[in-house]
Amino acid sequence: MLSVADDDLRLRILLALGYGLRAAEIYNLKRTDVNYASCQISVHRLKKRRRVATILTLPGHLLDMLKLVAENNHKRHDHVFAHETCSGRFRQALMKADIDPTVRFHDLRHTAASWLLSNGLNLEQIRIFLGHGDIATTQRYLHVADKEVAEAGQELLRRLM
């Protein structure tokens, strides 16, 4: 899907998959939230009706993409992204990439959480990564494949024997 997406959509997808960001967190990213010198962005999350800033460090190539998208934004000069929604372009990219058209942009956040779990992070670490206040919310995000469960069981048995 990344290969068929335009620069704006590709960056949004990478931020959602790589950092578990919500669509609104991406859209609301302001130019002043980006610190190119330290390679960091400040993401503002709504926590129990108050905004909390999360500082994320980005690799150089992602910062370059962010700068390019911000420079091409002629509609909202104070924000990185010009358009609130990318749903139409997201659906088009899904179709071009032959991916199930029922996939939602928010599903990328779920995918990020599942990838973190399969790479060894525990629930509490994933909760913090996603910015959830409650571990029960994090548990709803995780989608463990049957194959992963079977492999984990086999590994446990191997260690016991």
Image (cartoon, rainbow, N blue to C red):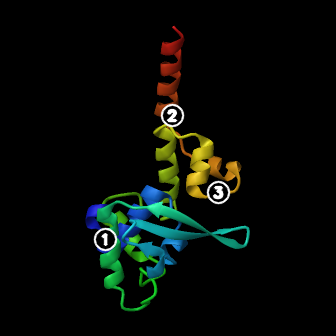
- At mark 2, the secondary structure is helix
Q: At label 1, which amino acid type do we have? A: Met
For marks 3 and 1, give the CA distance: 27 Å
Mark 1 neighbour density, 10 Å: few (under 14) some (14–19) many (20 or more): some
The image shows a total of numbered marks equal to 3
- The quadrant the N terminus occupies is bottom left
Asked if residue 103 shows in the view, the reply is no
Residue located 44% across and 89% down the image: 76
- Earlier sequence position, callout 3 versus callout 2: 3
Q: Which residue is mark 2?
A: 146
Please state the horizontal and vertical placement of residue 125, each as a whole percent of the image: 58, 46
Marks 3 and 1, the one that precedes in the sequence? 1
Seen as rendered, the residue at the extreme left is 3
The residue closer to the viewer here, 67 or 39, is: 39
Label 1 sits on a secondary structure element that is helix
The CA distance from mark 2 to mark 1 is 36 Å
Q: Are there few (<14), some (14-19), or many (20+) residues within 10 Å of tag 2?
A: few
Read off the residue under disc 3: 132
Residue 1 sits above or below residue 25 on the image:
above
Verify CB contact (< 8 Å) between mark 3 and mark 2: no
- Name the quadrant containing residue 51: bottom right
Q: Secondary structure at mark 3?
A: loop
Q: Position of residue 137 (x, y in %)?
A: 67, 53
Q: Is residue 61 left or right of residue 80?
A: left
* Residue beneath disc 1: 65
State how far apart marks 3 and 2 are (Cα): 25 Å
Question: Percent x, y for residue 147?
Answer: 46, 32
Label 3 crowd bin: few (<14), some (14–19), many (20+), radius 10 Å = some
Res. 50 in view: yes
What is the three-letter code of the residue carrying label 2? Asp
Residue at horizontal 41%, vertical 58%?
A: 100
Judge from the rendering whether residue 157 lies leftward or rightward of residue 94; answer left or right.
Answer: right
